[in-house]
Image (cartoon, rainbow, N blue to C red):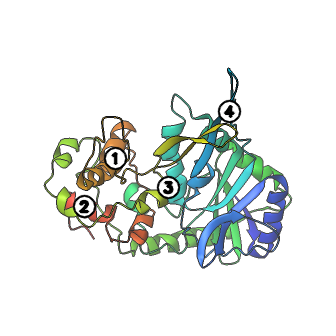
Amino acid sequence: MQKLPVSRLPELFARIDGMKSLYLPVSAGGRLQFGRWTTGTAYDPSRMNTVKSAKDFFFPQSEDLVFFRSKGKELSITEAKDPAEPFVLFGVRACDAKGLEALDRVFLSDPVDTFYAARRENGVVVTMACAEPEETCFCGAFGVDAAEPGGDVAAWLAQDTLYWQSRTDKGDALTAALEDILEDADQRDQGAFAAHKAAIKAILDDLPLNGLSLEGFGGDALEALFGSDKWPALSQACIGCGTCTFVCPTCQCYDIQDFDTGRGVKRFRCWDSCMYSDFTLMAHGNPRTSQVERFRQRFMHKLVYFPANNEGMYGCVGCGRCVAKCPAFMNIVKVIRTLGVNAHAR
């Protein structure tokens, strides 16, 4: 494990950005978003809950796929290959790093999504342990440890010291390139490091949603949950706005459309939402014609279908964004507490 004085963070950022484009959480208009680092960019480690997740850097909200151009009877087809510049994403939360693992199972399975794969190959994820998690967080319910984040490199900010620990080959390469900046941690640091992680765990244990139980969910719960008579009441408040899907770090649905630019046809894909009435609309119509069916589909996918097809891994990481952003105050926590075996878990 290495360490660095917090006072030298600007130096660390400058060194990283000199090798690869660096992105980290920055404040814009009072909201926290991942943005490009430049000299003088203020990084506030106490604020980590970005409005949208790190997903955008690997699965953009909109991206071109292919261009079609015709001249007479000749047709040319050009793939809109993204060069996928090398970049480092610094300050990713443990839940968002876990969300990337869920996306990997979708986009890196055969047939591999080459656009996503290129970005994953070129991106280095540096996570940051959550020293000040939000009250809407419930990552622990899904096996995410905010004090032990994943990623290519895991980092912790304890008082005036940044602790740095490589986790993958890409992390090793980045660490080696920073060897003249990073120092080896000593025995005294180990004590401070352990105390910092213990403090984080104490905060997590005291969160309002700590102890949320997933009993009654998972891949074997299809028959018990799909026909539940509680879905109509649960979905009644939902307005189908799709906010929950757009802030979610694991949602992966997209639509593909063609657009005539006047100089040819551009085929692109953009995020879509299972909460929309035209989602999966086909020539014969829509297989889910009511809001209750669309509502049920979203949460059944997160809590039943996804774990059934991914060795028990859920399609939620407990980041709390849907809890914080839903305008109707309807979210996955209410679904779990209403339908779960332990319906009154604190």
Give residue 134's position: percent from left, percent from top: 47, 74
**SS for tag 4?**
strand
Q: Residue at x 51, y 28 (%)?
A: 110
| Within-10-Å neighbours for mark 1: few <14, some 14–19, many 20+ | some
Quick one: label 1 or label 3, which is nearer the N terminus?
3
Q: Do the CB atoms of the residues marked 2 and 1 lie less than 8 Å apart?
A: no
**Is the N terminus in the top left, top right, bottom left or bottom right quadrant?**
bottom right
The residue that mark 2 highlights is: 235
Residue 191 in view of the camera: no
Is 290 on the left-hand or right-hand side of 91?
A: left
Q: Residue at x 22, y 42 (%)?
A: 222
Give residue 193's position: percent from left, percent from top: 62, 68
Compare residues 246 and 19 and report the one nearer the observer. Answer: 246
Comparing labels 4 and 3, the label whose residue is closer to the camera:
4
**SS for tag 3?**
loop
Is 261 on the left-hand or right-hand side of 278?
A: right
Distance between the Cα atoms at labels 2 and 4?
41 Å
Give residue 285's position: percent from left, percent from top: 30, 39
**Is the C terminus in the top left, top right, bottom left or bottom right quadrant?**
bottom left
Distance between the Cα atoms at labels 1 and 4?
32 Å
The residue that mark 3 highlights is: 249
- The amino acid type, in three-letter code, at marker 2 is Ser
Quick one: label 2 or label 1, which is nearer the N terminus?
2
The residue that mark 4 highlights is: 79
- The amino acid type, in three-letter code, at marker 1 is His
Quick one: label 2 or label 3, which is nearer the N terminus?
2
Compare residues 3 and 187 and report the one nearer the observer. Answer: 3
